[in-house]
Image (spheres, rainbow, N blue to C red):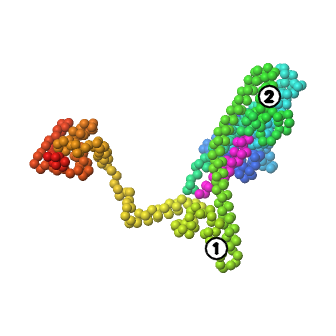
Amino acid sequence: MSLRVNSDQTLMAILQNKKIFYALMDSVKESVGSLSNEFTIGDYDRLLDDAVKMLASSSDRQKILDALCLENLHRNGLLIYLDQKVGIFRLQAFVLDMLQHLDSKRIRELSSADLQQLWKQLEECYRQVCDPTIMWIPDDNDYEEMLSTVYSTFQHAASELRKNIRGLRGKTEDLARIVEDVSEGRMEKVEQVRRALDSIILIHERHVTPTLEFLDQYAGLNGKSESDTLSNRGGPMALVREIIQKFDDRNKDIHVSRLQRIHFHIMSFAKEASEIAECLSIYVRFAERERKRYDRAETLFNDLLEAVRKKQTGNLRDYLLQPEDPVFSPMRAIGPLKSFLKGQSSNINWPKEGGIGDLAEMLRVKVQAYRDRSSPGFVEAEAIPPHSKQERLERTMLVRIREHLRDFDLSRCQGELFKSVHEYMADRMDDYELHMLFDAVGLIQEEGEPAYMSLTECMVIEFKGKRLRYRPVHPHNMDQAG
């Protein structure tokens, strides 16, 4: 017989060991697929024993067992029922809601049927507000009951929609993570991605779109209200405005302000639902393209299969398809079928796992074959050493000198070539140095202009504290003029 633990300590123990209940809910969902949340006593005891075994202290283990045993949960009113004969129990709804609230992926989204139920509650609330027998005076029993119903309905709708938005956001983020994080090298995850895309489409159609329709101020849900008089008033949000207007007509300003705050809070969910819908639309369009691609491939395969079967008549001749057959018309874009087959290497049987590894091996062999080919013009990139910093500076300096010499006219050169180029460069280049003169003269001589060097003379140029001794070079045109 376990010791009795009070309710607050029991709830704290549930929150501290919520993984037990998460595993219990997951096992029921996977094995039965039921939303009744009816659990077996054997599974719960097994999960509880596994959890307490991880605790080092025996006193801590006993405290957890006393708090979370089914007898203590039942004594504290946390179970709807406990059937020892059948071996099943069911937690109170608020306990499940509390556990699901801690993990947004476990929150149940609102379907069209759930939103229709909320709409019916708003309709019933509107009928009570419009009841002519109610006296809108304080302390009147009918008025107080009607007022309590209005607040309860509004708050319940806001709470359910808030949980719905959190559940949708958590579920879509989890599914989107599965689609985005899939590795191309892990082919076994293709089926998981396909299921995730199917779930995204289902959520978009069955939950997000009805939520947007419910929150639309100018339209209702698919289908009609059971009441003809109410169906003409638009959707649920229009009905909410009508209820608030009734309080405004009765000059109940305090209640109008409170109900409007709840209304504005509900309407704020429309923006979040739109953001979720916009995010999901990307994956919905992607899934639609994948579906169309698969349908197209399936159609082509079925056409090819039908064409092959028609050829199999038992004759020993004319039993093969020809490249010009109409069934191959979609392949005309890649050229003749025979040429296409000749251009392909040996077929690769792609396995279910590790396909990228086989592709990498094939590419490695192909690249190595090109490297081994001794054809002219094929140079290994590793054989070309990178340029040093000094080489890059020299290349840059030569480009600048060439740019400055673009307007230098050798035909108008008066006197000796070195001196003329030196004076020209010193006037136009701010960071000109004396050692650059040899490069400048060499660039001019590359143009092919004839010149001759004196073997007897020797001249000197001084610039920025440096002296250059050289043999003068005279352009050939000056020699002709002389």
Res. 79 image quadrant:
top right
Q: Which residue is nearer to you in this view: 165 or 32? A: 165
* Secondary structure mostly seen in the magenta stretch: helix
Dot 2: few (<14), some (14–19), or many (≥20) neighbours within 10 Å? many
Q: Which residue is nearer to you in this view: 102 or 208? A: 208
* Secondary structure at numbered mark 1: loop
Nearest to the eye among marks 1 and 2: give it: 1
Kindly identify the residue that appears in the image at 26 percent across and 50 percent down: 447
Kindly identify the residue that appears in the image at 62 percent across and 62 percent down: 330
Q: How many marks?
A: 2
Give yes or no for residue 196 being in the magenta stretch. Answer: yes
Please determine whether, in this image, residue 420 is positioned above or below residue 263: below
From the image, tell me which residue sits under label 2.
Answer: 243
Kindly identify the residue that appears in the image at 77 percent across and 39 percent down: 221
In magenta, the rendered stretch is 187-211
* Secondary structure at numbered mark 2: helix
Whether residue 58 is visible: no
Per the rendering, the mark at residue 320 is 1
In this rendering, position of residue 131 left or right of residue 1: right
Res. 70 image quadrant:
top right
Give yes or no for residue 454 being in the magenta stretch. Answer: no
Res. 416 image quadrant:
top left
The amino acid pointed to by label 2 is Ile
Q: Which residue is nearer to you in this view: 462 or 371? A: 462
Residue 179, position as x, y percentages in the image? 61, 49
User: Furthest residue to the right?
Assistant: 133
Q: Which residue is nearer to you in this view: 262 or 407? A: 407
Residue 33, position as x, y percentages in the image? 74, 50
In this rendering, position of residue 316 left or right of residue 370: right
Residue 154, position as x, y percentages in the image? 76, 31
In this rendering, position of residue 325 left or right of residue 75: left
The amino acid pointed to by label 1 is Leu
